[in-house]
Image: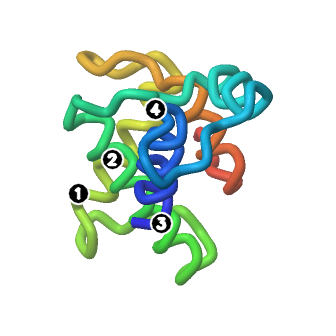
Amino acid sequence: PDLNRWMIHQRSRRRSAYGYVPLSDEQKCLLESIDFPMVSKRPAFRVWYEKYDQLLSFWRQNGHFLVDPREARPLANWVRTQRQRHNGTHRTAGSLSKSQVYLLERIGFPWT
């Protein structure tokens, strides 16, 4: 929930929505450099960041990324899919965006 809330806030700032301080040119460049999704009308983006938040919570509670499918099958499946997307071995999903790779690497997510 925290990341998703932050992303919504950045999108509001990008639009210069009422009550929000607009992003500086430098902030816009930084967000663009990681392929930050400025528009999130696609549910897949929202779902990805919700799962990322779940993984982050799991990691903070357990200190690792070994999600047991018997305890949290949807999250375990999502973790496996991210590895496959990164390695180019997933049958149907495309590759991860730069921002998704950055977020996962920032928390030390292992790709193997």
Nearer to me, 111 or 31: 31
Query: Which tag, 4 or 1, sits closer to the chain's start?
Result: 4
Q: Mark 4 or mark 1, which is nearer to you?
A: 4
x%, y% of residue 1?
39, 66
x%, y% of residue 109?
62, 50
Gap in angstroms between the C-alphas marked 4 and 1:
34 Å
Query: Which tag, 3 or 4, sits closer to the chain's start?
Result: 3
In the structure shown, which secondary structural element does the residue marked by tag 2 occupy?
Answer: helix
Q: Which mark is residue 2?
A: 3
Say left or right for 97 vs 90. Answer: right
Q: Mark 2 or mark 3, which is nearer to you?
A: 3
Say left or right for 91 vs 28. Answer: left
In the structure shown, which secondary structural element does the residue marked by tag 1 occupy?
Answer: helix
x%, y% of residue 47?
27, 46
Gap in angstroms between the C-alphas marked 3 and 4:
20 Å
**To which quarter of the image does residue 60 belong?**
bottom right
- The amino acid type, in three-letter code, at marker 3 is Asp
Seen in the picture, residue 107 relative to 42 is either above or below; the reply is below
User: Is the Cβ of the residue at disc 1 closer than 8 Å to that at disc 2?
Assistant: yes
The residue positioned 29% from the left and 49% from the top of the image is: 77
Residue of label 4: 15
**To which quarter of the image does residue 80 belong?**
top left
Residue of label 1: 74
